[in-house]
């Protein structure tokens, strides 16, 4: 069941809303934002030139560099008096990005996340344990606003505090979780050591996102916790979480809140708009935002769009789960590689965990790829037991088993990405855990 009627509009009804929003937004930024006024003037475009949705192609792209160059507030189109909430990115790769919200923007954000919660089956009878980080990052408060709007109770615990997370699940009767998928897997590991049976708790659903993850990881989380897990997508530059969401009915593709965020798919190299169903870079224009509206923001996320009516009844356009990023994908010996491709292979193998690290190095003039993968506790226990037997053939058998597992992983990864890799199996817990987005790549190549 949808949260709002806008989620089930006909295509013509939705396009009418989008065109009105696009025209309003272009006129608004032209009047109130010096950066966009100059960009539009340089292109010879005025607000009156936007007569159809196809005219969006006449507008300039916006990049993360534009936001950094105008840090902190030059990309804001609202006055300081109108801004009621600020957020910012971490700025780990340069200047941070500041984000400002008016009261109306917060209403749109809450509405987007209410739809997201409803899509996962979260409502007024639920207790949501919000593990997304609060503070300058948008994840925690976005999920908080949405849960409150649908009438759910919220436990604002934020990230970290793994044992306390588990204690609150047990003591507060949490029914829904919001978290990065990698941290949920970490919670399960810790809970398993504590003897916790997560399937005996009240948990029934989770919203996961904020990092690339595979369908295999989703199935693993669902099986371990006994819950339904829905993917969510968002980015601070556009609004935070709530740009798009999966429904529990299909768990296949994310419904974009396209009456707020107009999507396009472009060729990352040429910038040309691609037809429905083709994979390319995801671009968003905010068409109902006032604090910091953005025209054709290049997300660098790789996805594709499909239109139609979902079995859940929603007619919102769907985006495929992000398969990687055009700016952080690895190019190894001329081959484009995404960590999510490697993760999908790892998740299909027994005896290894979903914790891994992709290491890129340069040997001579050639780039090489090495993947460190943790083995499971069960694998370690069996190996140790065989070693303690003291029988030479048992030890040799274990060595052969390890070599076989490495060989099969290497072959499976090569089959998927097209190049040879080195695989190192490492003990459980040896790869650093993250309480936020998991860091999967270590690029050691000379700059």
Image: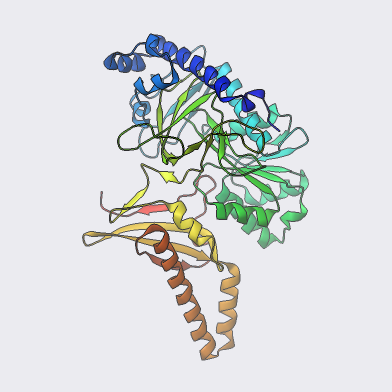
> For this view, does 2 lie left or right of residue 406?
right
- The quarter of the picture where the N terminus appears is top right
Compared across the picture, whether 189 is left or right of 168 comes to left
Q: Percent x, y for residue 366?
A: 24, 60
Residue 290 seen by the camera: no
Q: Is residue 250 left or right of residue 423?
A: right
Q: Looking at the picture, how far across and down is residue 141, in whole percent?
A: 60, 31
Q: Is residue 442 above or below residue 127?
A: below
Residue drawn at the location 40% of the way across and 26% of the way down: 296
Q: Is residue 216 left or right of residue 333?
A: right
Q: Identify the residue at horizontal 45%, vertical 33% (top origin).
A: 89
Quadrant of res 91: top left
Q: Residue at the far left: name it.
A: 365
Residue 16 visible within the image: yes
Task: Give whichever of 343, 95 is nearer the camera.
Answer: 343
Q: Please report the residue visible at 36 percent of the width from the left and 60 percent of the height from the top.
A: 418
> In the figure, 172 relative to 88: above or below?
below
Residue 370 lies in quadrant: bottom left
Write down the quadrant of residue 272 in the picture.
top left
Is 183 drawn above or below residue 69 in the view shown?
Answer: below
- Which one is in front, 337 or 303? 303
355 or 16: nearer the viewer: 16
């Amino acid at each position: 069941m949808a949260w709002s009627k806008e989620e089930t509009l006909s295509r013509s009804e939705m396009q009418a809303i989008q065109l009105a929003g696009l025209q309003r937004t272009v006129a608004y930024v032209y009047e109130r934002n010096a950066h966009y006024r100059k960009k539009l003037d340089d292109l010879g475009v005025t607000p009156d030139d936007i007569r159809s949705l196809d005219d969006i192609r006449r507008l300039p792209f916006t990049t993360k560099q534009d936001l950094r160059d105008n840090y902190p507030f030059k990309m804001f189109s609202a006055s300081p008096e109108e801004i009621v909430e600020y957020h910012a990115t971490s700025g780990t790769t340069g200047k941070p990005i500041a984000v400002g919200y008016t009261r109306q923007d917060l209403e749109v954000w809450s509405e987007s996340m209410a739809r997201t919660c409803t899509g996962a089956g979260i409502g007024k009878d639920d207790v949501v344990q919000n593990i997304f980080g609060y503070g300058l990052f948008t994840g925690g408060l976005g999920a908080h606003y949405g849960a409150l709007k649908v009438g759910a109770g919220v436990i604002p615990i934020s990230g970290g505090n793994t044992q306390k997370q588990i204690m609150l699940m047990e003591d507060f009767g949490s029914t829904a979780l919001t978290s990065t998928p990698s941290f949920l897997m970490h919670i399960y590991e810790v809970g398993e050591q504590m003897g916790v049976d997560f399937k005996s708790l009240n948990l029934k659903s989770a919203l996961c996102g904020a990092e690339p993850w595979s369908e295999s990881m989703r199935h693993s989380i669902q099986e371990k916790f006994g819950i339904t897990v829905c993917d969510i997508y968002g980015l601070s530059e556009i609004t935070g979480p709530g740009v798009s969401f999966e429904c529990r009915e299909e768990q296949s593709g994310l419904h974009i809140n396209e009456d707020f965020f107009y999507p396009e798919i472009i060729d990352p190299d040429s910038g040309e708009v691609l037809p429905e169903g083709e994979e390319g870079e995801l671009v968003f224009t905010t068409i109902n935002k006032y604090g910091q509206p953005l025209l054709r923001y290049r997300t660098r996320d790789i996805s594709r769009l499909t239109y139609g009516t979902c079995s859940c009844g929603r007619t919102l356009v769907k985006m495929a789960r992000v398969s990687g990023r055009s700016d952080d994908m690895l190019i190894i010996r001329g081959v484009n590689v995404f960590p999510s491709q490697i993760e999908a292979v790892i998740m299909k193998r027994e005896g290894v965990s979903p914790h891994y690290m992709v290491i890129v190095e340069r040997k001579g003039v050639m780039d090489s790829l090495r993947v460190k993968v943790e083995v499971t506790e069960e694998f370690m226990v069996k190996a140790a037991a065989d070693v303690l037997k003291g029988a030479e053939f048992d030890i040799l058998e274990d060595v052969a088993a390890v070599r076989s597992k490495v060989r099969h992983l290497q072959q499976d990864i090569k089959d998927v990405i097209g190049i040879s890799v080195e695989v190192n199996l490492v003990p459980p817990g040896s790869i650093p855990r993250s309480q936020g987005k998991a860091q999967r790549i270590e690029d050691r190549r000379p700059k």
